[in-house]
């Protein structure tokens, strides 16, 4: 039988945590697995004893069919060396550039809304392309959406197709051996080729630019230059590029789509955002230097990520025996942690389903910090965390500056795919501010 976690993952995880507590051992495919829900257990796995856990899980080996051995899926020395090489591309100095590109992303959404007054737009569809454009320009110096390195729609479709195959594969109780020409394998191969072509173009363009001599872009903006300088092979660079493109856009897109929906349901929060934007921006568009001066917008982003953490599950494989909260975890166990479950612990988050930005504004820290893991924790903390936060704050601030959002229909069901997707899209209208 297909285990419950693969059939109906979010309710399964919630039920299991509520019923059995902080550390729940259970078998998956005949092998030991453990669901870790407690704050202390999660901290031990991701941070305090992280060396005892690796990435050899269905989640990451399936993903590596698309990304290859990139930062998200590798372990050990290769991961350490590549992370060190890529890290400067995410330095604080680069965030001004991220903010500038985020304004162009906001324009893409704005244009869709502005084609007709009150027009309902599938915001999810637009932000997926908009966030892809931001990763391309801000991190790779490449135009992934408007022609250039690739046709944006084709690239988005390829990512979507590849991830759909990967998710189905991860959900099946058995998988065809690699290399067998099943229809799914052929679809994956086609999608991979599109991704490979886009990456090859980006890399060739960058090499040509480097050969032409030093110019404008600082190394901080240029992850490709950094990876080339660190001596990565073309294959390794391809894997890191696909990893960054995939990890860096669907997550932010999901976060923006769900957060806009929550705002559409909460005009009283939008009114507070408007008041803040009026005071701080006084009609101008936001820039990177405004981000720390927009605590309400930031609280909206944090609360959106609490309720809809795009990376809803984070898994590890125990490399050695460990004990979590008094429960023995034998080497080889699958260890499952879930930001979705963690962010709904009633002991840490009173009335957990409520969209309440004041959780972030009252500055009561306490246990909350450890129970909030939308970007993971420890040495494998998301490398793009600050990138994503600046992008989200700037896009939301710029969109809401002169308008509010309104829902069209009920809140969509949540589909736990590689990220949390809204079933059927996220249909929202915009209204000019009164
Ligand atoms: C890792 C979430 C945005 C690139 C992670 C992890 C999480 C996460 C939970 C840790 C996975 C684990 O421990 O197994 C998110 C969310 C985002 C976001 C919720 C947006 C709201 C981004 C962006 C980029 C990015 C914008 C790049 C531009 C990566 C990479 C890793 C990672 C490369 C692997 C890091 C490593 O292990 O060294 N992300 N992420 N992410 N993320 Fe993000």
Image (cartoon, rainbow, N blue to C red):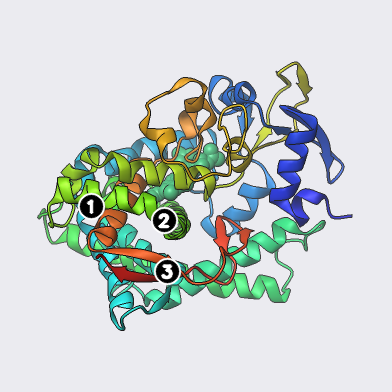
Quickly name the residue at label 3.
123
Q: Quadrant of the N terminus?
A: bottom right
Q: Which of marks 3 and 2 is nearer the N terminus?
A: 3
Q: How crowded is mark 3: few (under 14 residues within 10 Å), some or many (20 or more)?
A: many
Is the residue at mark 2 in contact range of ligand 1, meaning its CB lies under 8 Å from it? no
Mark-to-mark CA distance, 1 and 2: 21 Å
Quickly name the residue at label 1.
99
Looking at the rendered image, the disc whose residue lies closer to the viewer, 3 or 2, is 2
Quickly name the residue at label 2.
263
With respect to residue 358, does 213 lie above or below?
below
Q: In which quarter of the image is the C terminus?
A: bottom left
Picture quadrant of residue 415 = bottom right
Residue 219 visible (yes or no) = no
Q: Give the percent coordinates (x, y) of residue 382.
A: 44, 40
Do the residues under discs 1 and 2 have CB atoms within 8 angstroms? no
Q: Give the percent coordinates (x, y) of residue 143.
A: 28, 68
Tell which of 158 and 107 is nearer to you: 107
Tell which of 341 and 50 is nearer to you: 341
Give the secondary structure at mark 1: helix
Q: Residue at x 61, y 21 (%)?
A: 40
Give the secondary structure at mark 2: helix
Mark-to-mark CA distance, 3 and 1: 20 Å
Q: Earlier in the sequence, mark 3 or mark 1?
A: 1
Q: Earlier in the sequence, mark 1 or mark 2?
A: 1
Q: Residue at x 59, y 20 (%)?
A: 49
Tell which of 165 and 290 is nearer to you: 290
Q: In this view, does 298 lie to the left or right of 426?
A: left
Is the residue at mark 1 in contact range of ligand 1, meaning its CB lies under 8 Å from it? no
Q: Which residue is drawn at 39% across and 40% down?
A: 383
């Amino acid at each position: 039988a297909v285990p419950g976690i693969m059939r109906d993952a979010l309710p399964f995880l919630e039920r299991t945590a509520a019923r059995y507590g902080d550390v729940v051992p259970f078998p998956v495919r005949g092998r030991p697995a453990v669901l870790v829900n407690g704050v202390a257990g999660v901290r031990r796995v991701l941070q305090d004893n992280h060396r005892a856990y690796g990435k050899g899980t269905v989640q990451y080996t399936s993903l590596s069919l698309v990304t290859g051995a990139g930062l998200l899926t590798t372990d050990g020395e290769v991961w350490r060396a590549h992370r060190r090489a890529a890290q400067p591309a995410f330095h604080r100095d680069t965030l001004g550039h991220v903010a500038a590109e985020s304004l162009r992303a906001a324009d893409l959404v704005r244009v869709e809304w502005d084609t007709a007054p009150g027009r309902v737009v599938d915001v999810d569809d637009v932000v997926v392309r908009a966030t892809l454009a931001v990763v391309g320009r801000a991190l790779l110096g490449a135009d992934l959406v408007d022609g250039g390195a690739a046709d944006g729609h084709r690239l988005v479709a390829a990512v979507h197709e590849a991830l759909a195959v990967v998710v189905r594969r991860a959900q099946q109780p058995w998988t065809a051996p690699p290399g067998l020409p099943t229809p799914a394998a052929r679809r994956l191969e086609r999608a991979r080729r599109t991704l490979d072509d886009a990456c090859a173009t980006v890399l060739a363009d960058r090499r040509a630019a480097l050969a032409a001599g030093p110019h404008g872009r600082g190394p901080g903006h240029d992850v490709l230059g950094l990876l080339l300088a660190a001596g990565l092979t073309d294959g390794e660079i391809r894997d890191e590029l696909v990893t960054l493109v995939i990890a860096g856009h669907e997550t932010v897109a999901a976060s923006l789509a769900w957060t806009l929906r929550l705002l559409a349901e909460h005009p009283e929060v939008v009114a507070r955002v408007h008041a803040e934007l009026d005071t701080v921006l006084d009609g101008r568009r936001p820039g990177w230097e405004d981000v720390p001066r927009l605590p309400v917008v930031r609280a909206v982003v944090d609360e959106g990520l609490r309720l809809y953490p795009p990376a809803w599950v984070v898994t590890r494989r125990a490399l050695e025996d460990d004990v979590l909260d008094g429960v023995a975890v034998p080497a080889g166990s699958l260890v499952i942690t879930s930001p979705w479950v963690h962010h709904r612990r009633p002991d840490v988050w009173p009335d957990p389903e409520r969209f309440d930005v004041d959780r972030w504004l009252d500055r009561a820290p306490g246990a909350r910090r450890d129970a909030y893991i939308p970007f993971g924790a420890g040495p494998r903390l998301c490398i793009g965390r600050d990138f994503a936060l600046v992008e989200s704050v700037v896009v939301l601030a710029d969109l809401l500056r002169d308008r509010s959002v309104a829902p069209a229909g009920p809140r969509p069901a949540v589909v736990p795919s590689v990220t949390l997707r809204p079933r059927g899209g996220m249909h929202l209208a915009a209204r000019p501010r009164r």
